[in-house]
Image (cartoon, coloured by chain):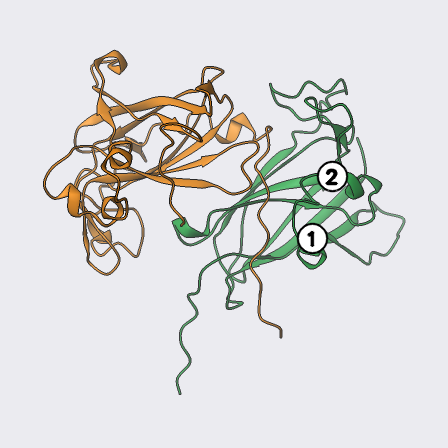
Chain colours: A orange, B green
Amino acid sequence: MSQPVVSPYCTIGPFFPFDFVDDCNDLTQFEERKAAGQHIWLAGTVVEEGNIPTGNTLLELWQPDARGVFRHPLDPRHSEIDPGFFGWGRARTDAKGFYRFRTVLPGPSREVDGTPRCAHGNMTVLAIGLTRRLVTTIFFSESPETAEDLVLRSLPDPSRRQRLFARRDEALDAGGLPGYRFDIVLRGDGETPFFVD
Amino acid sequence: MGQLMNVSGRVTDEDGAPIAGALIEVWQANASGKYIHQWDRHQAPLDPNFIGQGRILTDAEGCYRFRTIKPGGYPVAESDWWWRPPHIHYSIFGVSWMDRFITQIFFPGEPLNQTDLLLNGIPNAEARQRVMFEPQPTQVTKDLNILEFHRDFVLRGRRRTPELP
C-alpha cells in the first residue's frame, strides 16, 4: 500500500452551524459537576487589519484545569483531572467581533515529556478566508517563570510577547466573576503571534 | 427533497493506523443550495425536512457512515460571478489537539468545480482528487435507491506501535 498522504485542508467558510457552537463556551461545568478553582470570563474581540471586527469567527479554547492538568491521556498527571472541568470549549464572535468563554484560571502544567509550562490556555481561530486554523497561546499572569516558558522564549521581541497575555479587565466582570481580556488581531499592526502547530 | 446519498469512509493517521472514536462534524447546503444559517442570504428555499448538519464518531476501525441528500451549488453573496459547487464540509477531531482538521469535499464532474476558487486553491490535481467523493457502484432495485459515495481522510500524527525488529 502506498504511503498515506495527509488530507488537504480547506476553509471552514461562513456557515458552520450555530448548533455546534452555542452553549459550548462554558468550560466550568462537566457531567453535573462544577470545576474547582477561580472561575473567570475570558473575553475579547477579534479584528482583522485596520481594526475591522470579524464577526462569525469560530474560537476553540483548550486548556488545563486549575491545577494544570489537561483532559488528555498524554498529560503526565491525566488521572488527576478535575472531574468538573471539561477543558475544551467553543465560542463565536458576534457582529462586533466579541467573544466570551467562562473558564477557570489554569494552573501550571507539564508537557508530555514532563517539561514544566507556565499557566496557559490554547486558542484556535477558524474563519472564512483562513485556509488553515490559526493557533495561539494565552498566558494569564507575568512572573519570572513566564519568561522561561517555551512558547514565550520562541518570541524574541518583548512587545510581541505582551500580546499573549490575557489582562484583568473590570469592564468584563459579570455575575460576580472577574473578566480577563484577550484580543486577537489577525493581521497588521499589533498582530497576535500565531504558532505552527 | 433531493437525491438521497450515503457517505462512508475511514479516518487514519499518517501510518495508516485507524483513528477510532474521532468526532466528525458535517454540514452542508440543502438540495437548493441553501444553508440553515443566519448568514446565508441566498434566495433559495429552506427544506423543512432537512437539517443539513450532523455528528458521527468513527468506529474501532476508524470507519464512519452517514446518510444525507446531495447538496446544491449556490452563489457567493460577496461576489458578482462566483458559484460554489456542491460540497460537504467536514470538521474532524483526531486523537490530539494537533489533529484538528477542517475541509470541504466535492463531487467529481460538477461543472462548477472548474471555476471554484477554494477547490482550485488546492495547488495540484493529485491533492484535489483527495477532496473529491469517490462514487461507489450501486444496484438499482425496486426498494429505496440511494447513491453511495466514499471519502477517506488521513490526519496528521503517528501513533502506530513500532514494529519489533
Cβ–Cβ under 8 Å for marks 1 and 2: no
- Looking at the image, which is closer to me, A135 or A87? A135
Q: Position of residue B87 (x, y in %)?
A: 71, 40
- Decide: is A195 above or below A30: below
Residue A28 is at least partly visible in this image: yes
Q: Chain of mark 2?
A: B
Categorize mark 2 by other alpha carbons within 10 Å: few (<14), some (14-19), many (20+). some
**Do marks 1 and 2 both belong to one polypeptide chain?**
yes
Say which label, 1 or 2, has the lower sequence index: 2
- Decide: is A50 above or below A4: above
Determine the CA span between mark 1 and mark 2: 12 Å
Categorize mark 1 by other alpha carbons within 10 Å: few (<14), some (14-19), many (20+). some
Residue B70 is at least partly visible in this image: no
Looking at the rendered structure, the secondary structure element under dot 2 is: loop
User: Tag on residue B1?
Assistant: none
Disc 1 marks which amino acid?
Arg
Quarter containing the N terminus of chain A? bottom right
- Looking at the image, which is closer to me, A194 or B112? A194
Looking at the rendered structure, the secondary structure element under dot 1 is: helix
Residue drawn at (54%, 59%), measured in percent from left and top? B62
Query: Which residue is labeled 2 in the image?
Result: B116
Q: Position of residue B67 (x, y in %)?
A: 69, 43
Q: Quadrant of residue A145?
A: top left
Disc 2 marks which amino acid?
Asp
Q: Position of residue B45 (x, y in %)?
A: 76, 20
Query: Which residue is labeled 1 in the image?
Result: B128
Q: Quadrant of residue B110?
A: top right
Residue drawn at (61%, 20%), measured in percent from left and top? B39
> Is A88 situated left or right of B115 in this image?
left
Q: Chain of mark 1?
A: B
Q: Position of residue A38 (x, y in %)?
A: 17, 28
